[in-house]
Image: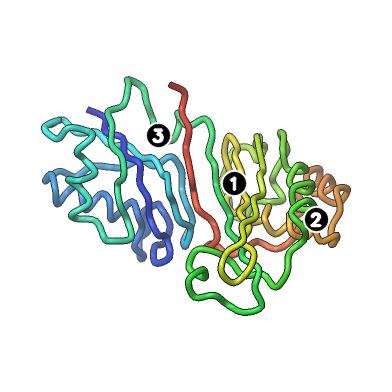
Amino acid sequence: MRYVLKIAYDGTTFAGWQRQKNALSVQECLEKAIQTALGVDVRVTGSGRTDAGVHAAGQVCHFDLENDSVPPEKMPDCLNRFLPPEIRAIEGWAAADGFDSNRSAKRKTYCYSLYVSEREMPLKERYAVRIDNAPTLEKLQAAAQLFEGEHDFKAFCASGSSVKTTVRTVYEVRVEELQSFGGRDLKIYVTGNGFLYNMVRTMTGELLDLANGKRTAESLQQAYQTGERNLLGKTMPAKGLTLMQVEYEI
């Protein structure tokens, strides 16, 4: 049987999703939990990689077992006893024939979290990035539209990537503002058919610069056309990024 899990994790102390030789990853912890709980060695495939320090509320992964004695909906409870507290399986189900958590994914949504404050707020720092000031919500929403559509996002990709194409489709960039203790919270939701290494974090830095008037729609278009990284704003820290949802065709 092909088991599918939805996983949530705090990525602060992990080297990302994928197994690493000299650092602890989410994938390694999950595979060890399966081995301990069920006595079998399996390879777990994720919907995609999340980088070191990036969190997930809705990572999806799958693995195969010859013995289907554990009902899919009970698999999260079976594994959570053996997972570190920073990782939890929150849903489980059986996959249809041909399902692949990576190849079958159609849309992914990430959220980048910011808060506006003169000083660090300890209860926000783990999952959001502090900025001293921010443009109005209206300016951020207007700038966000410049990322929507099909573009070559080569300039947004960190060096060393081995992807075959850097063209991606961004279906929506949505900015929400909340008032909370200590000031303004900003949530930037990005939904697309796939993402490059550091793409959303670089988009967030560029979005702030566009809304602040430090860069223009013309300079962004030039970045799309040339792929030159120096035409864009900074790459924001990993801790503000969370994989929220992975969508599949029913």
Sequence-wise, which precedes: disc 3 or disc 1? 3
Determine whether 102 is above or below 31 in the image. Answer: above
Residue drawn at (65%, 68%) of the image: 116
Name the spot of residue 31 as percent of width and height, x first.
25, 49
> Mark 2 and 3 residues: CB-CB less than 8 Å, in contact?
no
Q: From the image, state whether disc 2 or disc 3 is nearer to you.
A: 2
> What is the three-letter code of the residue carrying label 3?
Ser
Tag of residue 188:
none
Q: Which residue is mark 3?
A: 101
- Judge left or right: residue 9 versus residue 212: left
Sequence-wise, which precedes: disc 1 or disc 2? 1
Label 1 sits on a secondary structure element that is: loop
Instruction: Kindly report the distance in space between the C-alpha atoms of the residues bearing marks 1 and 2.
Output: 21 Å
Name the spot of residue 83 as percent of width and height, x first.
24, 56
> What is the three-letter code of the residue carrying label 1?
Leu
* Of residues 87 and 119, the one drawn nearer to the viewer in this rendering: 119
Q: Rate crowding at label 3 as few (under 14), some (14 to 19) or many (20 or more) other CA atoms within 10 Å.
A: many
Name the spot of residue 136 as percent of width and height, x first.
77, 58
Label 2 sits on a secondary structure element that is: helix
Q: Which residue is mark 2?
A: 210
Name the spot of residue 81 as percent of width and height, x first.
18, 54
Q: From the image, state whether disc 1 or disc 2 is nearer to you.
A: 2
Residue drawn at (59%, 67%) of the image: 129
Please tell me how many numbered marks the rendered image carries.
3
Which quadrant is the C terminus positioned in? Answer: top left
Instruction: Kindly report the distance in space between the C-alpha atoms of the residues bearing marks 3 and 1.
Output: 17 Å
Label 3 sits on a secondary structure element that is: loop
* Of residues 158 and 143, the one drawn nearer to the viewer in this rendering: 143
Colouring method of the image? rainbow
> What is the three-letter code of the residue carrying label 2?
Leu
Q: Which residue is mark 1?
A: 196
